[in-house]
Image: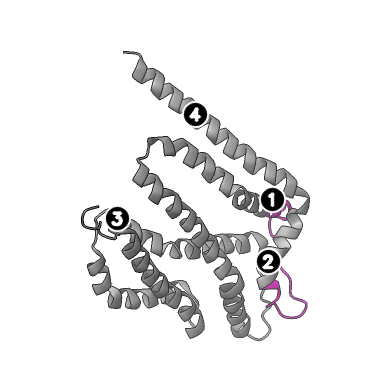
Amino acid sequence: MDLPEESFLSHLIELRNRLIRALLSILAVFLCLFPWAKDLYSLLAQPLLAKLPSGGQMIATDVVGVFLVPMKVALMVSFLIALPYVLYQVWAFVAPGLYVHEKRLALPLVLVSVFLFFLGMAFAFFLVFPTVFGFMASIAPEGVAWMTDIDKYLSFVMSTFLAFGMAFEVPVAVVLLVLAGVVELRTLKEWRSYVIVGSFVVAAVFTPPDVVSQFMLAIPLCLLYELGMQMARFVNKPPKDGA
C-alpha cells in the first residue's frame, strides 16, 4: 500500500536533484563568463552601435544599470550554453516513462526545436537587427540625437529573440499537430494560401513599416510552414502492408 507514495516521493526527489544540477550548470557557466559580461553586452549591442551616427552612443538612465544589464546578458548567454545539459536532465527524467516509439520521436523533435530556436535568434541578430536599426537611423529627424537606454535595448533584443525563436518553431508545431491528429496533412495543404496571407499580416505588425523588414519575416514563415509539412509527411508515413 505504501509503494505508490514511495514511488511518488522518489520521483519528486529525482526531479529536485535534476533541477539542482541544471541550475548549478547555469551558475557554473555564469561564473566563468562573469569577467567578460561587459564584452558580451558590447557584442550584443554591436548591430545598433554600427548604425548610430558618428559619435553616437547608448546611455544608462538607471544608477545600477551599467552593472545589472551586462549581468543579465551574461546570464542569458550562460543559459544558452548550458541548455544542452539542461535538456539532458529533462530528458533523463521523462524518458523512462515514454514508450519506445515516443522516445524515437521525442528526442529528434526536441533537438530540432532547439536548433530552430537558435537559428531564429541568429537570423534576428545578423539580418533583422541591421535592417531595422538602419531603417530607424535613416528616418531620424534632422537635429535629433538617436540614442537608447541600455536596459531598453536589452528588452527589445530579448523580445525580438523570443519572437523569431518562436516563429522558427513553426515546423515543429506543424508536426505535433499532425501527429496528435488535430489536423490532417491534406488540410494543411489547403490552408497554404491563408498561411501566406497571415504571414505577411504578422510581418506587417511586428516589423517596421518598410517592405524589406516585412519580407524578412514573412518569407521565412512561409518557408518554415512548407518545411513543417514535409517533416510531417516524413514522420506520418502509413505503415507498409504486412508490417
- The question of residue 172 being in magenta is answered with no
Q: Secondary structure at mark 3?
A: helix
The residue that appears at 71% across and 67% down in the rendered structure is 58
The residue that appears at 73% across and 54% down in the rendered structure is 37
Q: Nearer the viewer, mark 4 or mark 3?
A: 3
The label number, if any, that marks residue 179 in the structure image: 3
Residue 96 in the image, given as x and y percentages of width and height? 42, 35
Q: Label 2, label 4: how many angstroms apart (C-alpha)?
A: 40 Å
Q: Which residue is mark 4?
A: 14
Query: Looking at numbered disc 1 in the image, what kind of residue is underneath it?
Result: Met
The residue that appears at 68% across and 84% down in the rendered structure is 143
Q: Which residue is mark 1?
A: 71
Q: Which residue is mark 2?
A: 45
Residue 83 in the image, given as x and y percentages of width and height? 57, 49
Q: Assess whether mark 1 and mark 4 are in contact (beta carbons under 8 angstroms).
A: no
Q: Quadrant of residue 141?
A: bottom right
Can residue 162 be seen from the camera position used here? no
Q: Secondary structure at mark 2?
A: helix
Query: Looking at numbered disc 3 in the image, what kind of residue is underneath it?
Result: Leu
Residue range (magenta): 48-72
Q: Nearer the viewer, mark 2 or mark 4?
A: 4
First along the sequence among labels 2 and 4: 4
First along the sequence among labels 4 and 1: 4
Q: In terms of depth relative to the viewer, which is nearer, 23 or 96?
A: 96
